[in-house]
Image: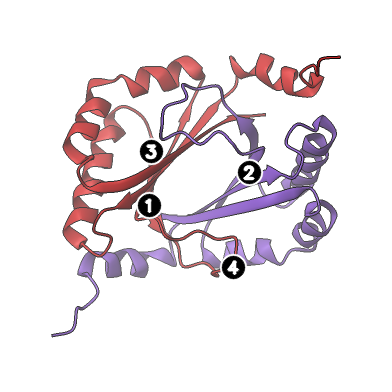
Chain colours: A purple, B red
Amino acid sequence: MSISAPATVNTFEAKENKSQIIHHVFFWLKNPSSEEDLNSLIKGIKTLETVRKIYIGVPASTELRDVVDSSFSASELLFFDDLAGQETYQNHPLHLKFVEDCSHLWEKVIVYDFVDM
Amino acid sequence: MSISAPATVNTFEAKENKSQIIHHVFFWLKNPSSEEDLNSLIKGIKTLETVRKIYIGVPASTELRDVVDSSFSASELLFFDDLAGQETYQNHPLHLKFVEDCSHLWEKVIVYDFVDM
């Protein structure tokens, strides 16, 4: 017997086209102690604000529990109305220019996209 | 000569007490294909909504670029007015009950806290 996809997960997927997409990106700088590089990266992220409201930040000094990862250098968080909105952003000239201008600064990037339920 | 902390980073820290804290948690289930476990986890996260507005979701089906991590099972995103608000939430009876009731479901948790600039 084959295992069919769980019904509830399918419901999430069906809802996705009309649900908000939350796009969270974490950057780890090649030179994490460089104030200049951090400022350049944040300046770069700020150029994207003309495209969309962005929450931009650095690690907060919350309690360093085992599960907390505070090793990243900077973070950006965006909300999109739907999948199409996220794709438009990815291909927007200002986003492409940001990647071109700033990608030499970072060593690692992790992107998490989730659909709000 | 000792290396002093970069001035800009200090500015970020100084601002932190009055800046919004963004708290993003990712959960990886022990049994990622279990619809029942996912539903139990999400039901657990939803009990926290009485404490604070929470964005709750599952991975979105955005393009699977190299940098995108879509391996997590569920995610919760919360905004706090300040560090104290985040700490109050951590110690809230409903939060402690959620961890007690649901922690057997997950294999891994990553928490990212960042301060909005």
- Please give the name of the residue rendered at 43% of the width and 59% of the height, measured from the top-left corner: A19
According to the image, label 3 marks what residue? B54
Say what amino acid the circle numbered 1 marks.
Gly
- The quadrant where residue A32 appears: top right
Nearest to viewer (mark 3 / mark 2)? 2
Measured along the vertical axis of the image, is residue B99 above or below residue B89?
below
Kindly state the secondary structure of the residue where label 2 is placed: strand
Rounded to the nearest whole Å, what is the CA distance between mark 3 and mark 4?
27 Å
Measured along the vertical axis of the image, is residue A9 above or below residue A29?
below
Say what amino acid the circle numbered 3 marks.
Ile
Across and down, in percent, residue A117 comes to 35, 53
Rounded to the nearest whole Å, what is the CA distance between mark 3 and mark 2?
18 Å
Across and down, in percent, residue B79 comes to 47, 31
Q: Residues within 10 Å of mark 4 (few under 14, many from 20)?
A: few
Tell me which numbered mark, 4 or 1, is placed earlier along the sequence.
1
Q: Which of B116/B34 is in front?
A: B34
- Residue at the left extreme, as displayed: A1
Q: Residues within 10 Å of mark 2 (few under 14, many from 20)?
A: many
Q: Residues within 10 Å of mark 3 (few under 14, many from 20)?
A: some
According to the image, label 4 marks what residue? B65
Count the marks: how many?
Answer: 4
Residue B57 — which label? 1
